[in-house]
Amino acid sequence: MSAEAVRTAFRTALHELGVDRCGASPVVVATSGGLDSMVLLHLMRFSGDEGGRPVQPNLVVAHLDHSMRSTSGDDALWLRGTCTAWSVPLRAGVVEHAPVSEESARDVRYEFFESVRREVGAGLVLTAHHADDQAETILFRALRGTGLEGLRGIPEKRSPGIVRPLLGLWKDDLASYAAATGLRWREDATNTHLTFARNALRHDVIPAAEANVWGSARKSLVRLGRLAEENEVAWVAVLPSVLSGLRAEATEVSTSVDARALHDLDPALQARVVRYLSSGLSVSLDRAAVQRALVHIARGRSGTGVDLVGGVTFLRELDRFVLRKTTRPLPDQFLEIATPGSGAGEVRLGDRATAVEWSLGSSGTALHGAELFAIPDLEFPLCVRARAPGDRIRLPGGTRKVKKLLLEARIPASERGTLPVLVDRGGRVLWVPGVARTDAVAASGDTLMIGIET
């Protein structure tokens, strides 16, 4: 590909990715000093128009010295001189303790890029990943046994603001552009070390595959990634309608679906649904976790559950299956009503805070569902707390276990500990809002009105 063809393809990618619509906002260019990133920086700096103006007028270069080789400091000095000559500001950093693996180095690198993005107020960080990187990534993931989603490879865009405009270009295209423009760069000697998995794929495995198996193996791998991308995009479009049929309900920490409807789906579709629901909780499930969920769909009884991964539990609660991301609960905070009068407060049970208001007489509360209690029949202090083992409440037909009443009201087990219960000094249950009120205390005469928001 000629240099002009590279420029044209690059401008097209910038437009499709929205990079050319950043206005005056800074754009960070991640630059190591190697061929790929220097081509990216050169294209951003010099391929804007015939007048030599940059593609984007407010560029910032981000360079991180990983301290993984003795000459890395020289690369930073060389890049500083180049940025000065090209009138582009540089933000450089140095890792104090060298990363011990490719993965840890990548994590540190992206943390640095994000810090620069925030520092300069940029919306985007551009990285120089190209089509050869894509082929290597897809093959690497396939060899490790990734799922179909992993075969999508490197995304063109990902949060927070990472954009890869060179993914449509091959390494040979970048090298041709560099030769045509007289571009210089720094060689990283570690790129030839076959102890790194990516280097082994790049220098040994893929060339051997193209020489002995299929001449266009790299292109086939990239095409596989595109097919996987299309497949996953299609599933993302279809699954919301599937969830609608499952009567899905979601909160910040859980999602539930109709148990019978989920049970009746084909297991392959059940697996898709479970993975999709877990992604909504920012959790990725491995195959073993999904299999545990499928077994529970087939056999699980109400009140039972299985731990999946990443603090996620899959539960059967009455006629619902619930995928819940567990968090460390705060200690319960009960509320005491010491004497008849007026007041307001809050009770916190599990992850739920409930407002409570009380006043004398039959007015003074704006809370829905308030109850009246005859003051002479009450033993103060009253307490609003969680249900306790053995709690019973007196009703017209005799005393009943509160636990049994909650079950009959079809309140899921996971919610029963968050429901407030009003008791008196002796532990006598007076009221379970929305469920039952004792007949042992009258609701007329000198009364205390208590409202508990349910």
Image (cartoon, rainbow, N blue to C red):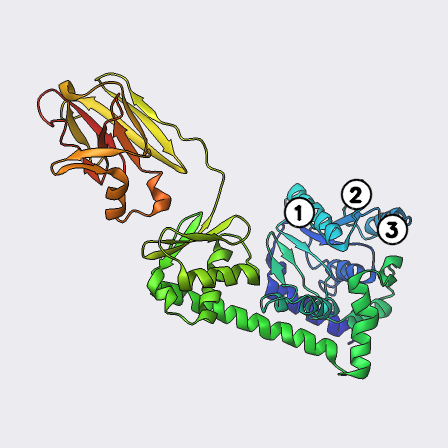
Judged by depth in the image, the label closer to the viewer, 1 or 2, is 2
Q: Is residue 186 visible?
A: no
366 displayed left or right of 52: left
Provide residue 226's location: percent of width, then percent of height: 61, 73
Nearer the observer, 24 or 287: 287
- Crowd band around label 3 with a 10 angstrom C-alpha radius: few (<14), some (14–19), many (20+): some
**Taking 185 as reference, is 8 above or below it?**
below
**Taking 368 as reference, is 322 above or below it?**
below
206 displayed left or right of 224: right
Residue pictured at 17% horizontal, 31% vertical: 371
Q: Which mark is residue 75?
A: 3
- The amino acid type of the residue labelled 2 equals Val
Asked if the residue under mark 2 is in contact with the one under mark 1, i.e. CB atoms within 8 Å, the reply is: no
Provide residue 322's location: percent of width, then percent of height: 40, 54
Judged by depth in the image, the label closer to the viewer, 3 or 2, is 2
212 displayed left or right of 18: right
* Quarter that holds the N terminus: bottom right
Residue pictured at 73% horizontal, 61% vertical: 128
Which of marks 1 and 3 precedes in the sequence? 3
Q: Is residue 71 visible?
A: yes
Residue 369 is drawn in which quadrant? top left
Asked if the residue under mark 1 is in contact with the one under mark 3, i.e. CB atoms within 8 Å, the reply is: no
Residue tagged 1: 114
